[in-house]
């Protein structure tokens, strides 16, 4: 049910409040909105009268948000951002619709981007806007309609559709492999191990799957797959990487599998498409979900053959 109109202040009051909250100044908001300082002050006071409480603490010639005002400002800013994003998307494509998709950087560039022309061929009326996110976020606070998620099947306030699994392989430069001559999983502990911040226990779990007691797997830490892969290419250590994301480096010989005779291990986590609860019927999201699930299934089938 749509909320009562009496709980929806006029847009002019909300815009004045958001600007004043961001600048922590009525004068700064007035300059941005091309109004007088007194006009902004009157709008803020009108909003406070509607709310029944003060949003700012007024001290001499300065103002600062009250604790309640700070919380309200964050909610209002997120709502205004969503309205702005929706308007921009509609203007860009009034006949189709737009979708803001948060992607994992390397997955987005290595797997998703090369396949997107197929999506646009099938859905020419949809505009897809991509933004990078490395970790889960609150859909209510971000102007994002869906996200690519890797991890357990859980996203607070969201729904999930399974896309695919991945296999991980230890890889390094040919020179590093020649230097250490790895033969068994425990041999990797003699070399520098490269870690990904979003998967801090990946090496420990991988080694444990081969009954190797990894008491010390410390090493360099990176925030993105692309960076850790390049560090491995440069010979800085051994990286544990999803095989499908480093196919180019393996084919070019920049990276080599450290233990090619050992079976590949599948990650316990999987890739998912996540979206806000209650948003399932949004047409562009429905189209993207159907296409992504099918593309992932075709990829998994091709990988199995």
Image (cartoon, rainbow, N blue to C red):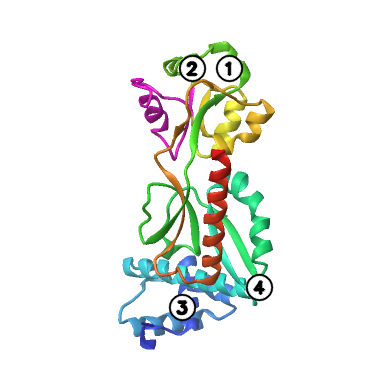
Q: Nearer the viewer, residue 247 or 158?
A: 247
In the image, residue 68 above or below residue 160: below
Disc on the earlier residue, 2 or 3: 3
Disc on the earlier residue, 3 or 1: 3
Residue farthest along the left direction in this orientation: 52
Residue denoted by label 4: 93
The circle drawn on residue 191 is: 2
Bin the neighbour count of mark 4 within 10 Å (Cα to Cα): few under 14, some 14-19, many 20 and up. some
x and y, in percent, of residue 74 in the image: 41, 66
Image quarter of the N terminus: bottom left
- In the figure, is residue 181 to the left or right of 57? right
Callout 2–callout 4 Cβ contact below 8 Å: no
Residue denoted by label 3: 14
User: Hey, which quadrant is residue 291 in on the image?
Assistant: bottom right
The circle drawn on residue 176 is: 1
Please tell me which residue is depicted at 47% across the width and 62% down the height of the picture: 142
In the image, residue 235 above or below residue 113: above
x and y, in percent, of residue 238 in the image: 52, 24
Bin the neighbour count of mark 3 within 10 Å (Cα to Cα): few under 14, some 14-19, many 20 and up. some
Please tell me which residue is depicted at 66% across the width and 62% down the height of the picture: 120
Image quarter of the C terminus: top right
Q: Which portion, as a residue range, is magenta?
A: 193-220
Disc on the earlier residue, 1 or 2: 1
Callout 2–callout 3 Cβ contact below 8 Å: no
Marks 2/4: CA–CA distance = 53 Å
Callout 4–callout 1 Cβ contact below 8 Å: no
Can residue 202 be found in the magenta stretch?
A: yes
Q: How many marks?
A: 4
């Amino acid at each position: 049910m749509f909320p009562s109109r009496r709980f929806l202040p006029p847009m002019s009051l909300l815009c004045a409040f958001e600007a004043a909250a961001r600048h922590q100044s009525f004068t700064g908001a007035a300059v941005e909105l091309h109004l007088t300082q007194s006009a902004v002050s009157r709008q803020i006071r009108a909003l406070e009268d509607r709310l029944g409480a003060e949003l700012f603490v007024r001290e001499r010639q300065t103002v600062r948000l009250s604790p309640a005002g700070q919380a309200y400002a964050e909610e209002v800013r997120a709502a205004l951002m969503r309205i702005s994003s929706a308007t921009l998307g509609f203007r860009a494509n009034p006949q189709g619709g737009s979708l803001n998709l948060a992607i994992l950087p390397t997955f987005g560039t290595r797997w998703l981007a090369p396949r997107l022309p197929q999506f646009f061929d099938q859905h020419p009326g949809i505009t897809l806007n991509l933004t990078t996110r490395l970790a889960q976020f609150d859909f209510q606070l971000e102007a994002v309609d869906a996200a690519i998620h890797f991890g357990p099947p859980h996203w607070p306030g969201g729904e999930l559709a399974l896309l695919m699994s991945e296999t991980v392989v230890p890889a390094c430069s040919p020179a590093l492999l020649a230097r250490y001559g790895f033969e068994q999983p425990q041999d990797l502990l003699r070399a520098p191990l490269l870690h990904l911040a979003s998967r801090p226990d990946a090496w420990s779990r991988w080694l444990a799957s081969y009954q190797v007691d990894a008491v010390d797997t410390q090493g360099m830490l990176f925030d993105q797959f692309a960076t850790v892969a390049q560090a491995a290419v440069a010979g800085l250590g051994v990286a544990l990487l999803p095989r499908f994301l480093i196919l180019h480096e393996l084919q070019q010989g920049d990276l080599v599998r450290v233990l090619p005779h050992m079976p590949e291990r599948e990650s316990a986590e999987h890739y998912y498409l996540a979206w806000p609860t209650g948003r399932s019927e949004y047409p562009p999201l429905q189209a993207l979900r159907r296409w992504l699930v099918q593309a992932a299934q075709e990829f998994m089938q091709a990988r199995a053959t």
